[in-house]
Amino acid sequence: MISRDQQQQFLDEGYFILESALSSQTLDLLRGACDVLIDRVHSEMDRLGTDHIHISHRHQRYHIAKQYAQVEGLDEYVFGDLMAEICRATVGPDAYLFYDQYVVKAAEVGRPFAWHQDSGYLGFQHTPYVTVWAAVDDMTKENGTVSLLPYSEAGLRSLVEHVRDEESGDKVGYFGNARGCQAIVPAGTVVVFSSLVFHCSSPNRTDSMRRAYVTQYSPEVILDPATKKPKHLAVPFLENGTNIYNG
């Protein structure tokens, strides 16, 4: 599915897009899993007596992380053939699941995300990894699709220091005027980009929810320098190009 031109674009600009790559059955799985996980977030907010956990805000924006094993069947997508092909084309023959998350913007009030590099959320130097951003809904300018800043437009391809916005909880790494390129794509499209690519998204101004499911894969286990333990997830996926995941 991934062409040599797309592999070269990843090397040169940090990203490529696979339009309508997911089946209707996979989209049904991703949508159902999202509903289940949002309900669980609401229950946790109720228990804590809050409307804000980390960078999730009730009925505005949800960031639901590291839950791939908590909904039946979701791991079949996370460790499936498409993700294996993407990993081989980007991070190489060895790959680990580093992180997974739903990024959801509620209708009409869904908050934006500031310009950032995914690597900027770690706060230390590490081998770059790949982000696979799956459009669970049709993505438009109006509902706050992702915008990417290619390497050539950003003028760099290295990790920069990020500053946390106290109100939103976002980390911000780019303060310039570049607009980048918006992923105006149908549901089922997969946007693949390096953890060093700046990206952002605008608010959802439509009357429907906007959902994306993000999985991230590293070519090696990323260790936290403070604890010397794996950061986030470190689930073996590929070894010498072979899928070795055993869920």
Image (cartoon, helix red, strand yellow):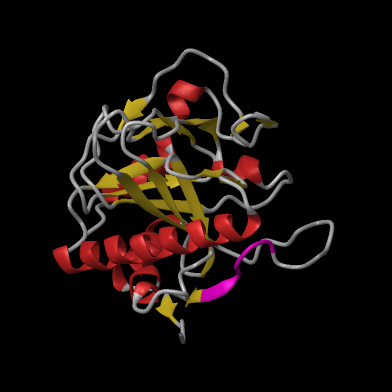
Picture layout, residue 142 above or below residue 242:
above
Q: Quadrant of the N terminus?
A: bottom left
| Identity of the residue furthest to the bottom in this view | 246
Residues drawn in magenta: 231-236
Q: Position of residue 2 (x, y in %)?
A: 26, 56
Q: Position of residue 91 (x, y in %)?
A: 48, 58
Seen in the image, is 207 located left or right of residue 228? left
Picture layout, residue 206 above or below residue 49:
above
Q: Residue at x 47, y 62 (%)?
A: 92
Examine the image and state in which quarter residue 87 appears.
bottom left
Q: Position of residue 122 (x, y in %)?
A: 67, 47
Q: Residue at x 72, y 46 (%)?
A: 125
Picture layout, residue 5 above or below residue 244:
above
* Nearer-the-camera pick, 161 or 84: 161
Q: Residue at x 56, y 28 (%)?
A: 156
Examine the image and state in which quarter residue 9 appears.
top left
Q: Position of residue 98 (x, y in %)?
A: 56, 62
> Please, what is the dominant secondary structure of the magenta stretch?
loop
Seen in the image, is 18 located left or right of residue 144? left
Confirm whether the magenta stretch covers residue 233: yes
